[in-house]
């Protein structure tokens, strides 16, 4: 299975998936912590992948998404964005609405 096939399978398996550094309970960077905090506050289920555990996936995602940084939040297979975009969506209420429609 190629790295793109792995990514596409993960995106099919989980309607809301965030690629972060660390875990939701122990984020390994401030940006991941902010996105996880926003997701938890929306009170909708989400899955995660710790990109620190898989260097091939980490590099492959940068190419796949054409987005060079992490975290990366996907909803129904579409990249919503990284930390700044997700925090802004959370503050306007758009994130909660988007997640509610996805699950």
Image (tube, grey):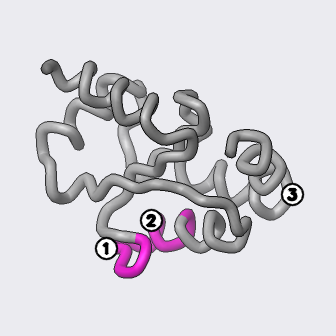
Q: Which residue is mark 2?
A: 32
Give the Cα distance between marks 1 and 3: 26 Å
Residue most extreme to the right: 92
Task: Please name whichever residue, 29 or 47, is drawn nearer the observer in this view of the structure.
Answer: 47
**Which image quarter: residue 68?**
top left
Residue pictured at 62% horizontal, 71% vertical = 40
Give coordinates of residue 39: x percent, y percent: 62, 64
Quadrant of the rendering where the C terminus is positioned? top right
Q: Is residue 93 left or right of residue 64?
A: right
Q: Are marks 1 and 3 in contact (CB under 8 Å)?
A: no
Choose the circle earlier in sequence order: 1 or 3: 1
Residue situated in front as seen by the camera: 96 or 80:
96
Vertical relation: 72 (above or below) 34 = above
Q: Position of residue 12 (x, y in %)?
A: 45, 29
Q: Secondary structure at mark 1?
A: loop
| Residue drawn where x is 31% and y is 73% of the image | 28
Farthest residue toward the bottom?
26
Cα distance in 3D space between marks 2 and 3: 19 Å
Q: Which residues are magenta?
A: 24-35
Residue 88 belongs to the span the image colors magenta = no
Q: Are marks 2 and 1 in contact (CB under 8 Å)?
A: yes
54 is higher (above) or lower (below) than 62: below
**Residue 61 in picture, x, y percent from top left:** 31, 33
Q: Earlier in the sequence, mark 2 or mark 3?
A: 2
Between the C-alphas of marks 2 and 1, the distance is 7 Å
Residue identifier under label 3: 92
Q: Residues within 10 Å of mark 3 (few under 14, many from 20)?
A: few
Q: If the image is split into quadrants, where does the N terminus sit?
A: top left
Q: Secondary structure at mark 3?
A: helix
Q: Which mark is residue 91?
A: none
Which residue is denoted by mark 1 in the rendering?
Answer: 28
């Amino acid at each position: 299975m190629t790295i793109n096939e792995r990514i596409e399978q993960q995106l099919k398996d989980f309607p809301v998936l965030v690629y972060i550094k660390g875990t939701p309970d122990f984020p390994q960077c401030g940006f991941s912590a902010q996105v996880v905090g926003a997701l938890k506050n929306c009170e909708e289920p989400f899955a995660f992948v710790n990109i620190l555990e898989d260097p091939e996936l980490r590099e492959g995602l940068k190419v796949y998404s054409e987005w060079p940084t992490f975290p990366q939040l996907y909803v129904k297979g579409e990249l919503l964005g990284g930390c700044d975009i997700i925090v802004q969506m959370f503050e306007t209420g758009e994130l909660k609405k988007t997640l509610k429609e996805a699950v």
